[in-house]
Image (cartoon, helix red, strand yellow):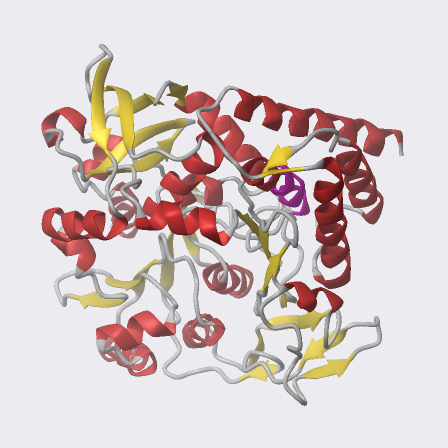
Amino acid sequence: MRKIIFITLIVASQLATAFSVFAQSTLVSKSFFSVEELKQDFDIFRASLEEAHPGLYRYKSKAFMDSLFIVSKSAITKEMSDLEFTVFLFKIASHIGDGHLRVVPPKVRLDSLDEGPTAIPFQVHFVRNKLFVKRNFSELNDKDFLGAEIVSINGHLISDFLKEYLSFFPSDGNNQTHKYRAISAMRWFTRYFYILYGYSTSYEVKYISINESTFKTAKLQGLIFDKLLDIRKERYPTLVNEPPAEFKFSPNEKYAYLRIGSFDKGQFKKAGVNYSKFLSSAFKTLEKNNVNNLILDLRNNGGGTDEYGKELFSYFIDKDFDYYESIRMKKEKFEFFKYTTRPDAKAPKGMLKPNDIGSFDNVKHPNYGLQTHSKPTFKGNIYVLINGGCFSTTCEFLSVLHYNTKAIFIGEESGGGYYGNCSGPTPDLILPNSKVRLELPLMNYSMAVKNYVPKDKGIIPNHNVMPTITDIITNNDIELNFAKSLIK
């Protein structure tokens, strides 16, 4: 108990630090809320998590969470803006260890951000606690700016930004690589910079060009996000036109290459690709040509349709199998729904069945129960390329593949928990006073795996291979090249 009290006191200190970040920022907000209003919202925030979150005690004990909630509420001693309160709640939610659980600023805030000329005009890449320019959408010359280290933006040191960002961005368990890769998302970098430092339509950027040591400064105009996408399409057309999956095989090569860039059903539909037929064709080609080495590239696959992960795995096992150990939900209907846009929502009839631990099993999920393996079965060597961009459905697939095969994993730790995640239906809870929102997943997915250590991480690769920013901007694929070298 003393350890729990000590840890929660540290958390209280971190929450107090969040206030000082805003005190030093350029944030000007007319939306400030009293201590009483904030505590009312906090009580709803806590009650909703305790009522509905299916993995609240997955990584932290009930005693720890109870103490955290008590200490956090007592730290509300002065009025806050909605953005300050967003960070405050985010820092609490991050201790739960759920990468799908997100605290979101009020809708009116994000609408003004997304519709205005606020998008930071470059895409970043995280390497060893630094941010580098991965894609350039500004008017700066690529030779000067691409690959540059970003030192500060609008006077805010990137080292300070990253310290705050990493303290509250959610991830499964104690995983960090998901946080590293998520900041590369174009909307998210602007969003989290805004949450911490306020609204801006221009950015004074201090940077160091690649292979140089002197500081440079440039004033960059923010972009409307649609304009940024147009520039991206013009400057990086191969990225825009990249299909959600591809399969390559050459009779002269000793391997085949299968990339699944997403498990999102919508992306396959948009691309005009039938996922099931695509997989069937690929594995028939492997069998027909007696291919013994397969490089499976799942880097930056953020997940999608649950069934797609299971269907891919079904080609790597020659018997029927369990994919999920369980899919559980605390209740059929929740009190906190009254704070969402669907107050009367409840599970479809027949979907949930009471279990012997007081919760409900989702017995209608297509991945529930014994699954049928697919033919032909690939029995050769599997080399899997992974990074922190692997998340959700992708990490479910990776866990089952790791547990049931001798696949070799190359890259960096995957971005999701080995034993499962909380996702599925995710209603948008709107706190009545501050209008801060909570995306609260309702399903606890537990994978049919065991005996993996550490229990609070993703897949730890057999070979840790990390590209430099030079590799990134010159398209030198060192992970793929490493896999080829193992095969040779």
Above or below for 445 versus 65: below
Locate residue 234, reporting x and y percent.
10, 50
Locate residue 284, reporting x and y percent.
28, 81
Is residue 421 in view from this perspective? no
Above or below for 18 versus 422: above
The answer to whether residue 449 is left or right of residue 282 is: right
Which residue ends up furthest to the right in the rendered image? Answer: 1
Q: Residue at x 41, y 20 (%)?
A: 157
Locate residue 373, reporting x and y percent.
48, 82
Q: Residue at x 50, y 60 (%)?
A: 392
The answer to whether residue 94 is left or right of residue 312 is: right
Q: Magenta span covers which residues?
A: 88-96
Above or below for 372 versus 67: below
Locate residue 356, reporting x and y percent.
84, 76
Q: Quadrant of residue 120?
A: top left
Along the line of sight, the residue nearer the viewer: 257 or 14: 14
Q: Main secondary structure of the magenta part?
A: helix
Above or below for 410 versus 151: below
